[in-house]
Amino acid sequence: MNENEIELKNNAIIHKDNSLNRLDLSFLKHIELNEYKKSDLLAYWINDFAEYHDEETTFNIAKSGIYSVEML
């Protein structure tokens, strides 16, 4: 791994940690304000987004059955 790759990896880890800390604060805020539905919706959204993001490289819209190939 060269220096540029190491820096990119370290930056990715720092950004991930910062994002997760910010997200945790948001969850705690909603829970403390008794906004349980907002906290649940946020959790569902994050889980769905992560799943879509992980499958993005293998997703084939033609196999989804929602759109026809002609529309593409």
Image (tube, rainbow, N blue to C red):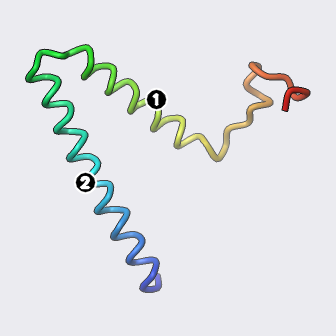
The quarter of the rendered structure image containing the C terminus is top right
**Within the image, what quadrant is residue 34 found in?**
top left
Question: Residue at the location (10% across, 20% down)?
Answer: 33
Question: Looking at the rendered structure, which numbered label has been put on residue 23?
Answer: none
Question: Quarter-wise, where is residue 46 in the image?
Answer: top left
Who's the residue at 45% across and 38% down the image? 50
Circles 1 and 2: CB distance less than 8 Å?
no
Judge left or right: residue 62 versus residue 45. right
Q: Residues within 10 Å of mark 1 (few under 14, many from 20)?
A: few
Residue 40 horizontal side relative to residue 34, left or right:
right
Q: Give amino acid for label 1.
A: Asp
Res. 44 image quadrant: top left
Residue nearer the viewer, 30 or 51: 30
Which residue ends up furthest to the right in the rendered image?
70
Q: Nearer the viewer, mark 1 or mark 2?
A: 2
Label 2: few (<14), some or many (≥20) within 10 Å? Answer: few
Please count the marks in the image.
2
Badge number at residue 48: 1
3, above or below 63, in the image: below
Q: CA distance from mark 1 to mark 2?
A: 20 Å
Element marked by disc 1: helix
Residue at coordinates 14% horizontally, 22% vertically from top-left?
31
> Mark 2: which amino acid?
Asn
Position of residue 17 in the picture relative to residue 54 (left or right) = left
x then y, percent, for residue 56 = 61, 42
Residue 26: x and y in percent read: 20, 34
Q: Position of residue 20 (x, y in %)?
A: 26, 46
User: Which disc number belongs to residue 18?
Assistant: 2
